[in-house]
């Protein structure tokens, strides 16, 4: 399970060192893809394939649009972790998630995936979730 919150920094080439606790869940490669609320989702190969099968079924049953399926498929990239546990986040994903080379980012667990956030967006989304858990009293 991907849990916890880790502060990191993108290097000037758009590379990100994933937390060591997450690396063991990813083996040597993972999928990076557009996530909800403008984050980058990080999936293991197995979990990405499972999620993709669910998306295909949701399109067949009308629960999801083909446009959303296409956006998801077009954004996905299979990346290899280097010896330091870094992945390169390509420009389209960085632009979508508002991640700038050299900037501080937040890598958070979301049970079946990790999420990479710009700090400002992460704080807003995290505050909303805490408020919901606190009965609207954040």
Image (cartoon, helix red, strand yellow):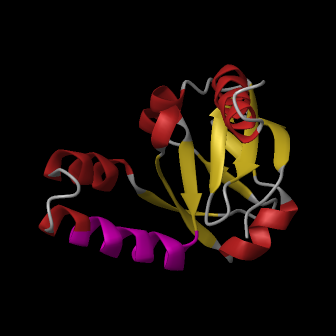
In the rendered image, the vertical position of residue 58 relative to residue 47, given as above or below: above
Residue drawn at the location 66% of the way across and 29% of the way down: 128
Q: Nearer the viewer, residue 85 or 58?
A: 58
| Residue 114 quadrant | bottom right
From the image, which quarter does the N terminus lie in? bottom right
From the image, which quarter does the C terminus lie in? top right
As drawn, the residue found furthest toward the top would be 120
Magenta region, mostly helix, strand or loop? helix
| Residue 53 quadrant | bottom left
Q: Which residues are magenta?
A: 44-57
| Residue 124 counted in the magenta span | no
| Residue 136 quadrant | top right
Side of 35 relative to 30 (left or right): left
Side of 63 relative to 47 (left or right): left
Residue drawn at the location 48% of the way across and 45% of the way down: 35
Residue drawn at the location 73% of the way across and 63% of the way down: 2
Q: Nearer the viewer, residue 13 or 66?
A: 66
Any part of residue 65 in sight: yes
Residue drawn at the location 71% of the way across and 62% of the way down: 82
In the rendered image, the vertical position of residue 110 relative to residue 118, given as above or below: below
Any part of residue 12 in sight: no
Side of 76 relative to 29 (left or right): left
Q: Position of residue 111 (x, y in %)?
A: 67, 63
Q: Position of residue 12 (x, y in %)?
A: 69, 29
């Amino acid at each position: 399970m991907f849990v916890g919150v880790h502060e990191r920094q993108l290097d000037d080439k758009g590379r990100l060192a994933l937390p060591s606790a997450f690396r063991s869940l990813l083996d040597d490669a993972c999928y990076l893809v557009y996530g909800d609320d403008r984050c980058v989702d990080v999936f293991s190969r197995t979990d990405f394939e499972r999620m993709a099968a669910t998306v295909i079924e949701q399109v067949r049953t009308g629960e999801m649009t083909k446009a959303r399926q296409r956006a998801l498929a077009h954004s996905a990239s299979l990346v290899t972790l280097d010896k330091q546990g870094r992945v390169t986040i390509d420009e389209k994903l960085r632009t979508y998630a508002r991640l700038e080379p050299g900037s501080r980012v937040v890598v958070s667990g979301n049970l079946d995936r990790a999420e990479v956030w710009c700090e400002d967006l992460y704080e807003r989304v995290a505050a909303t979730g805490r408020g919901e858990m606190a009965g609207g009293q954040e």
